[in-house]
Image: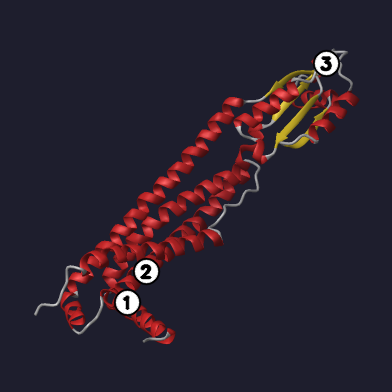
Amino acid sequence: MTGPGTWIARHAQAALGASGRLARAPLSTLFTIGVIGLALAMPLGLKLFVDNARAATGDFANAVDLSVYFKVGTPIEKVRQLAERARSRAGVASVTVIPADAALAEFRRYSGFGAALDAITDNPLPHVLGIRPRAGADSTAGLAKLKDYFASWPEVELVQMDIEWVHRFNAILEVLRRTLLVAVLVLAFGVLAVVGNTIRLEILNRRAEIEVTKLVGGSNAFVRRPFLYTGALYGLLGALLALAIVSAATTLLAPAVADLARAYGSGFQMLGTGGDDALRLLGGGTALGWIGAWAAAARHLRSIEPQA
């Protein structure tokens, strides 16, 4: 009966043996790790692109703002009172009061019609509320509910919202999410295939050694163990290479992205790979390598039996 120390020693021996076999075949090891690294770098790069796009645009929060236009002549005190009511409503993140005088002054400043506006005695512009929805209430249904709520006020003339852009933006996000999911599934299958084929070839090359091990009483689990660690090492090293590829690409692109952002008056800085994403990639790569090796070993070791 073996104790925990023996179990740990056997696994450590299998892991060290797998590392040694990879080191003794550096060229084939590098090719395999390179293929796995490229496969894992693609979904990570796509996720990083989506994260940067969302951060750069602020999820297009301004695109789903509502503008509430009051009837001309509505007192500003009444507008401010209604603004307080709007701030207390669920689903509203912030409310900005834009008085008609401030809107006219801004229009005069930027329109170039200052002299023509001097001839107007009465301000034709209404008071406006700028409504920003909360993050959880910016769905199409939530925005429609907010629009109906403000439109029901008797003092309101018009509630403006680009609902078509909301539909387009939500569709774009859904396409990106599904593309990322498909890429993860397809490339994960590719990693499984690469590791499985590599382990299959190694099993065939070591067939005589496996037959001798089984002849002296070695179980399938004992024979399979070093191959599992080989697959796990392939997955782990491939994930590390994927992190290096994406980090290098981010470092190269960051200055150009910063220059482009400054040209548009933004202080956006490109996001890199976060710690959680890195841990998920390393764990996922190791798991894929282990699973691919287990599938190949379980299939091919059963067909290898010692010859009498």
Residue that appears at 22% across and 82% down: 217
Callout 3 amino acid: Val
Q: Return the residue at label 2.
A: 232
Q: How many marks?
A: 3
Alpha carbon of mark 3 to alpha carbon of mark 2: how far? 71 Å
Between 297 and 163, the one lying in front of the other is 297
Q: Return the residue at label 3.
A: 72
Callout 2 amino acid: Ala
Label 3 secondary element: loop
* Chain-order first, disc 1 or disc 2: 1
Could you say which quadrant of the image residue 204 lies in?
bottom left
* Chain-order first, disc 1 or disc 3: 1
Quadrant assignment for the C terminus? bottom left
* Residue at the far front in the pictured view: 1
Between 268 and 243, the one lying in front of the other is 243
User: For this view, does 11 lie left or right of residue 298?
Assistant: right
Residue that appears at 75% across and 20% down: 152
User: For this view, does 109 lie left or right of residue 59?
Assistant: right
- In the picture, the disc for residue 18 is 1
Alpha carbon of mark 1 to alpha carbon of mark 3: how far? 80 Å
User: For this view, does 167 lie left or right of residue 37?
Assistant: right
Could you say which quadrant of the image residue 96 lies in?
top right
Alpha carbon of mark 1 to alpha carbon of mark 2: how far? 10 Å
Q: Is residue 54 above or below residue 146?
A: below
Callout 1 amino acid: Ala
Circle 1 Cα neighbour tier, 10 Å, few/some/many (<14 / 14–19 / ≥20): many
